[in-house]
Image (cartoon, rainbow, N blue to C red):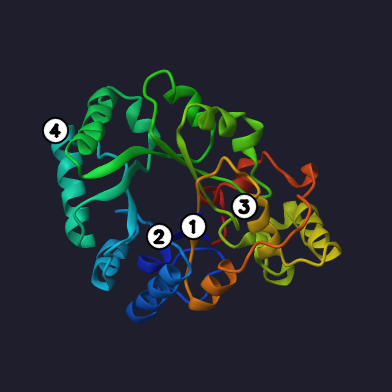
Amino acid sequence: MRRLALGTAQFGLDYGIANSAGKVDGAAIARILARARQGGVDTLDTAIAYGDSEARLGAAGLAGWRVITKLPAMPAEVDDVTAWVETSIAASLQRLGIARLEAVLLHRSGDLLGERGETLARSLEGLVKAGLTGCVGVSIYDPSELDSLWPRWKPQVVQAPFNVLDRRLLSSGWLPRLAQHGIRVHVRSVFLQGLLVMEPARRPAWFSRWSALLDEWHDWCAANSVTPAAAALAFVDAQEQIERFVMGIDSLQQLEQLLQPAPAVPLPPAQLASEDRELLEPSRWRLA
């Protein structure tokens, strides 16, 4: 399962609609990392904005791991962009207890489009030249962000949401386009923060407007004798142009399920896909 990358937001935050256990404790983090390495996983995905995830990963020990982290949105008051980038990454490396990152991503690609964008791009490239990271890129929420970014700066790696319901990376044409240009593609939100695997009875009332679509998904899984988790994972695993899929882990049991070979199931039908950003982007959810 070398294409699997462990997402670590749950190591530093109470994260995910289906997460009822809260932050993962330190002992569990160590067990998860050890089992993941045994299962052939070599990549971790974290971020400065993920609470104390970086520090807790560093405490667990990261020798031999490929680590990706993300810079947060650049504060408006930052005058020296290069100093902000270098200081932020130096602090990340210290918390993680490593000398070099696999990749540094921007959490907000729009920072590259403003008046400080050119300097920010040069500063990111400077991290590669200094040997502090292997590559740099962006984490996006909608492939349309690439339409604006592409003429100005071409990232070396792009992380984007992608799942059974959210196929915008494919429908926009960006997945094959990125692969054609040799740009590494990592995807997240394979389970849509747990919504795709949540039992309908536990689904928050806010999602009632999409009940027909979500129920059709569960019906399709039942008709094909496959669990929603296995079907969702198999769908992403079938996309050969994706280098890594980032999966958030909050228990050893979850990891064991992910390490199982993807079942041979047909691809979910096209009518299960949606373009509704209210559904596809968790930042737009109104659950309180």
Label 1, label 2: how far apart the Cα atoms are? 7 Å
Q: Say the numbered circle drawn on residue 237.
A: 3
Q: Earlier in the sequence, mark 1 or mark 2?
A: 1
Would you identify the image quadrant in which residue 172 lies?
Answer: top right
Crowd class of label 1 (few under 14; some 14 to 19; many from 20; radius 10 Å): some
Do callouts 4 and 1 mark residues in contact (Cβ within 8 Å)? no
Question: Which residue was labeled with disc 4?
Answer: 80
| Three-letter amino acid code at the position of disc 1 | Arg
Per the image, the residue denoted by label 1 is 2
What x and y, as percent, mark residue 152? 37, 20
At label 3, the amino acid type is Asp
Relative depth, front residue between 94 and 40: 40
Helix, strand or loop for disc 4: loop
Query: What is the three-letter code of the residue carrying label 4?
Result: Asp
SS class, disc 2 = loop
Separation (CA) of disc 4 from disc 1: 39 Å
